[in-house]
Image (cartoon, coloured by chain):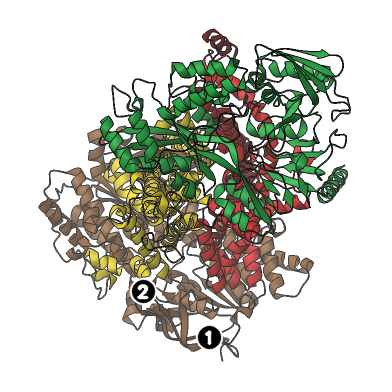
Chain colours: A yellow, B brown, C red, D green
Amino acid sequence: MAKRTTGIVDRIWDSDIFHSFIHSPTALISSCILVIILLTSFFCEFVAPHDPFTPSSLSLMDAFTPPFWVEDGNTVFLFGTDGQGRDLFSAILYGTRISLIVGFSAILFSVIFGVLLGLTAGYFGGRYETIIMRLADVQLTIPSILMALLIDGVVRGLISRELHDEVAIFVLIFAIGISEWPQFARVARGATLVEKNKDYISAARIIGLPNGIIMFKHILPNILRPILVIGTIGLALAILAESTLSFLGVGVPPTTPSLGTLIRLGNDFLFSGEWWISFFPSFFLVILAFSINLLGDWMRDTLNPKIN
Amino acid sequence: MDFLEITNLNISYLTRRLLVTAVQDVSFSVKKGEILGLVGESGSGKSTIGRAILGLLDEPGKIEGGSIQLENLNLADPATEVSAFRGKRIGLIFQDPQTSLNPVMTVGEQLLETIQTHLQIDAGDARKRAIELLDDVGIIDAKTRFDDYPHQFSGGMRQRVVIALALCADPDILIADEPTTALDVSIQSQILALLQKLRSDRNLAVILITHDMAVISEIADRVVVLKDGRIVEMGSPAAVLGNPSQTYTKRLVSSVPPTDRRIHRFPIMNSDQGSAADQNLKILNRWQLQKNTGASLVRVKSLSKSFSDESFMRIAAKEPVHAVRDVSFEIREGESFGLVGESGSGKSTIAKMIVKLIEPTSGLIFFEQDDITTLEGPTLLAFRRKIQMVFQDPYSSLNGRMKIKNIIAEPILHHNSQLGQMDIDHYVDDLLAAVDLAASSRDRYPHEFSGGQRQRISIARALATQPKLLVCDEPTSALDVSIQAQILNLLKDLQEKLGLTILFISHDLPVVRQMCDRIAVLRDGAVCEIANAERLFDAPTHSYSRHLLNSMPKFQP
Amino acid sequence: MFSYFLKRIVQSVGVMLCVALLSFSLFNFVGDPINNMVGEETSTEERAELRETLGLNDPIHIQFGRFVANAIQFNFGKSYQLRRPVSELIAERMPATLELVIASSILALGFGVLLGVYTGINRTGILSNFILFVSLAGVSLPTFVIGILLIYIFAVILGILPSFGRGEVVQIGFWRTGLLTASGLKALILPSLTLSLFQMTYIIRLVRAEIVEILQTDYIKFARARGISNHSVYFGHALRNSLIPVVTIAGINIGTLVAFSIITETVFQWPGMGFLFIQAVKFVDIPIMSAYLVFIALVFVAINFIVDILYFLIDPRLRTKNENQDG
Amino acid sequence: MYLKKITSFMAVALLATIASTAQANTIKWSMKGDSLTLDPHEQNEGPTTMVSRQIYEALVTRGLDMSIEPQLATGWTIENPTTWVFTLRKGVTFHDGSPLTASDVVFSFNRAKSKTSDFKEYIDSVTSVEAVGADKVKLVTEGPNPILLNQISNIFVMSEAWSKANNSAVPGDFNADEKTFASSNANGTGPFKITLREQDTKTVFEKNDGWWGTVEHNLNRIELFPIANSATRVASLLSGEIDIVTDAPVQDLKRIDSSASHTVNSVEQMRTIFLGMDQGSAELRSSNIKGKNPLADKRVRQAFYQAIDIEAIKKKVMRGLSSPAGIITFPGVNGYTTDLDARLPYDPAASKKLLAEAGYDDGFDITLNCPNDRYVNDEAICTAVVGMLGKVGVKVNLFAQTKSTHFQDLKNGLSDFYMLGWGVPTLDSHYVFSFLYDSKGSWNKVGFNNARVDELIQTMVVEVDPGKRNAAIAEAWAIVKDDISYLPLHHQVISWAAKSNVDVPIRPNNEPLFRFATVN
């Protein structure tokens, strides 16, 4: 019966992946949560009840309003406000967007970079491969967080402090991205080595196809699955890395806070009873990372259980 | 009653979409001291039965009904603690000796462990017994090999170790699941001999599960033929294979390549697919046929290839492995030339060099008049067009992410890009027709096809450039005999019609005999003898050729 | 085998050189080293003089050579910010970090492998599913959040564990240890737990995946077919084969812990190198940064080397030459 | 061998644990940063002096009530306006047992005047120091100095013999990283002596049994743990690991106070927080207004002033722990009056109007430079200011950074609009004027330049008749207040949080005096 399927829709509907997806509660729930978070945060201008980042719109007298269900909280500020009278709910939406942007761009950067190097290294082999892979080793020698800190430090040294705040985001993206590429390069290379020795590649070469076509038309589509999986898990890690750096105060500036920055700012109020200021951003961060991880976990099990 | 009796066994797998019945109403029995052959093509459920007896069915396999009576115990009954009998009364041998031993334990450890699990004897005795076992299965100087790790044994030796392990608690019955499929013929014959010896020495009951009629016909006392989980017929090999009563068995038997004579085509009985012979080949219209002069198409002069891994970080380089040593031969237009040899004989390496996948270390290869090592640019492209290849593994030889039409159209486009979309589509259809595939296949993906169909597809792809030389590297060794017969027929037809020259590489002597006009026998990368097929099989001159032919299992119904 | 190790050593040296080059360029190209060393009032002549005496006019490769020579003696000059020799600063804080890291690696590896094997063996059990779920949550919790949480619960609400510092320390030679006093050990609990949690959950998942994969191999099936008891199948066969990847993980794990100690130390006021490093980054204190970088690299290289040796002990296929000529 | 090592470890460990357990009356003290050096002349910064103050003593000092009282000197006579003679206390010994002599005092003054000393400014008016007999010291100043006693209360006395023996005769140059023995060791005459020093980690003081004074404290031991992370600092106070925190974050005071076993003491600190507005430059660096300087227009400065809702800042940011300021000086300083300290009313409407009059109907851009780790909630205050100015149409970009770089920028004149806090160690208005209003004042970064004020400042220096001098001060204040050359925010209130059973009297200069502390 599998043979009769033709239309793309049918094929998807029929595919085991889709089937196991709609039959895996975790995958469904997590992806629903993700979709919601993505939409709300990317359209936060329209979703958010307030605009938390134009100072003139804030009123200091609103500061430290607790969440609406706590006494003397009100529904104007669902999750209450921070020390500047900023609506936490809105701030979180905006913050989430920044975290996501940084996470996505960073992972995209490292995927492209890593896969390109890994693919070519695996395909051409020889000296080139050795060099690339040694580079990857050296890169791996420097843990991501440390790498990011270093780069941030270097940038601080190179450009003026005012400028630094403006480029902070790009520094973050680059820093996190550059420190993640080796794992993609390794996986891509590994998969390439496997595919490269399969007969369909030999066939392609006997036909006389140029290397470029063989690599990108034949090999690349066949090694995307593992990349996708570690990419997803990498995304969660990237987001956490971003928030960690922001927490350490070397991330995005407080004027446009990411979740990590919000947590850092709220952390000062942890003992003063204004628990919500640090709680909600942390909560959102964990939910975000968690649902991405759940999805990645499910992918790992269905797409290819082999990689770890 | 017999020692092991299986009655109305039903086994089924519940997959996501439907309940697959793997085994249906199977009943047979084994006596002590007899070898029962379970024979059938892939999917016939023969291995499933083997596993079921040991209660080792893979998830989600389940015994639905029937009984497996080991003397007074019903192993099929979930209540009985089957694991208590594993290894103790029933031994199991796996197909691939490479993977069935734990790589990080010495064979000694594994033997001792097994022995002491079943027999209450102290380490000393256990060790003594282990070494005896190794002796029995023919491991030379077992005492010292005792402490070696699996990877230090050759494939044949490993399989002997596996057998020794299966015999640790000397069980009354041995289930051998394709015990020789992964091995070379010469080793295969030794292992089979060993099984026979053990059977008689220890009065073992042996269930031999295999797809290889020849093997069955050689050593089985009784044979059970399975198809789709049902028993087709059973009895003595002579009776069942000699004059089968069932059409399926007939077809099966008839598609086994005979070793003693060369037949023109394999008789395909009520085959679901008609053969290319009946219909006229549309691709002929495109094919510019020229008379085969019988002049030499490929000339190989003292060809050598040695592999040495050079990574520039390495301090001490290993000494290179000589895969091919000073090989010379020529292939004439229109003939089909065979390269035979056991694994590691370098036959595939030679093929790769001829199709210019890898470069020779030394020596020359001429295709038509030009030295292919010098080719590049347009001349290389022209060469590529004239020589194509069909590979062994039907699963890895097609890009799973591409539709069939694109797979086949790719070489066409690459070699004459001026063709319009229409022409290409027609061409693809014609090619599909040429290999007896429905035009509807064009929009499907490889995973939707069976192994045989995939081989047809890769043949179609190979034909797409209208090559002169078709290199077939073990094109059928991954297929069931009946499918193999069809593919071989197809190749024969195409060669006839299209005047193809074929370089046929195989380890399977009967197949080679059926396919090839001239044959080169290879061993450790060197040519032993080159001769006409008939001559070689009737009167081999080289000792190794003789050895090969002798150890090749004869299918004599 | 010897040549193998020789090769590894050469590679390690190569890696170290690369890292050295990195931190060297940090030194020379991030800001003007002179400016970082002297105050504004220093005259241009003095600067030129200093530049000469520091050999900043020599060709770059000579400078690099000198840098490496110094680095080997772990001489990275003085901290721009704290105005003290970097080697001294690092040496002062290293024990704290190492004790923290070692403690948490023991936690992470111990529990990680244990639970990993457990969940790998009974894949369907409720408990193991629970463990997996929790572990996934663990991978999603940023270290600093965990830290804050633990402080809040154990130090503030329950008040049973210290929330900062190392407690009473004992000086032994240059090493200042907190492992020998009750309060020192108590102070170690929260930070090491915080630090290990992320890695632990990570290891659980990796080990599990490994075990699951191995349990599907032929030799495990064959072992079962021989009637080998579950117990020895799991611990005799599966575990031993899963050791190789576990060792790799362990290696990387420890290195990562060193890096992540930065966060933990900030949250728990742990007087270690990470804390020092964060300050260095904020003040662009290049000497500390590059020294720390080299140190980390050293740790990693050392670990990798040990891992390689362990491979040899675990995997016979590396130890003995492969005599199998067919296939 | 190996075993031996182990056992010796154990022995040490045992001792350590015993030591740690067996202490009556210990105070565990914590603050954000550590003292940068133990050398009392090497570096002049809050925490450093706070530590030195417990170990070292000066000729005169300020008591709990901040009034000048004798310490190492029992009394002094003013022979003529420029010559002071101090009589030394008898029977004073250093921690190493050696007695205090006049030559020690002379040595210390010269040491404090040496090039590498960070305290030389305090006594740059002192031209000569000499011993008169064994127990008298004569100070000669250039010109009369009404605030000499204030100044010398910060000059600690060291042992000449000890310093020379440990080649610490001159303080190391802190900025050039010269460390001397005295930087990490101490030998004073004070009520406590250092027994353990781990920079940035732990410092242990023990009771000096040989102290000359009458012991009013009941401590055997003080342990100082610097904790940078304020959350951790509070946590450790609440969890009882720390007895007193001398810089508790205001937002946590409520919670700390609510805990039964803790108390919070607050007092107005001798520091006023204010904003500087560059009115001197021809053009602002960070503004979109080119060719002229909006802040040069008093109306604009007043608009800024009246746009700021100081009460909101007090309530929300400072949690009530601040007192709004009208001038940059505080009660207790000579020249302070409550009338001067009254603010212009908060009035956004008026503010808008003023801007319009000045021709900035739709405001302008400007950058506010702000420290983020110097004053109580400094960054939060700035953020609030940004919001409030935004409401009257001035678009302020906040640039907050760590104190060292903030002050650098300030010193290099890179800041148009900045936050600064000012204390008055001498408790005399002159200190404020000479630094902030003198046209050549080293901290006058707003380009305030008023000939009359410069005159008056001169008067403050030379005028010995208190009446005339105070008149000058009053006039000066009137001028600068009217000019709104700075935008005063509030006087900082400092709060110490401690366990209820620990009593350390709080002082407006934020310096604890543990010799008055008790534990019960």
Q: Is residue C227 left or right of residue B447?
A: right
Q: Quadrant of residue D388?
A: top left
The residues bearing labels 2 and 1 have C-alpha atoms spaced at a distance of: 32 Å
Number of callouts in the render?
Answer: 2
Q: x, y (%) of residue C324?
A: 57, 51
Is B97 located above or below residue C184 in the figure? below
Disc 1 target residue: B76
Q: Is residue D181 above or below residue D369?
A: above
Local secondary structure at mark 2: helix
Image position, residue C54 (x, y; %) = 59, 15
Q: Nearer the viewer, residue B88 or B1?
A: B88
Question: What's under tag 2, amino acid-wise?
Answer: Val
Q: Amino acid at mark 1?
A: Ala
Asked if D61 appears above or below A186 in the picture, the reply is: above
> Can the viewer see residue B444 in this picture?
yes
- Crowd class of label 1 (few under 14; some 14 to 19; many from 20; radius 10 Å): many
Q: Residue at left 34%, top 41%?
A: D390
Pinpoint the chain carrying mark 1.
B
Relative to D222, does residue D181 appear above or below in the rendering?
A: above
Instruction: Name the residue beneath numbered marker 2.
Output: B253
Q: Is residue C209 visible?
A: no
Q: Farthest residue toward the front? A: D467
Residue drawn at the location 54% of the way across and 73% of the way down: C126
Residue A140 in percent (x, y) is at: 52, 41
The answer to which image quadrant residue B126 occupies is bottom right
Residue B124 position in % (x across, y down): 79, 66
In this orientation, which residue lies closer to the viewer: C144 or D372? D372
The residue that appears at 68% across and 53% down in the rendered structure is C162
Element marked by disc 1: loop
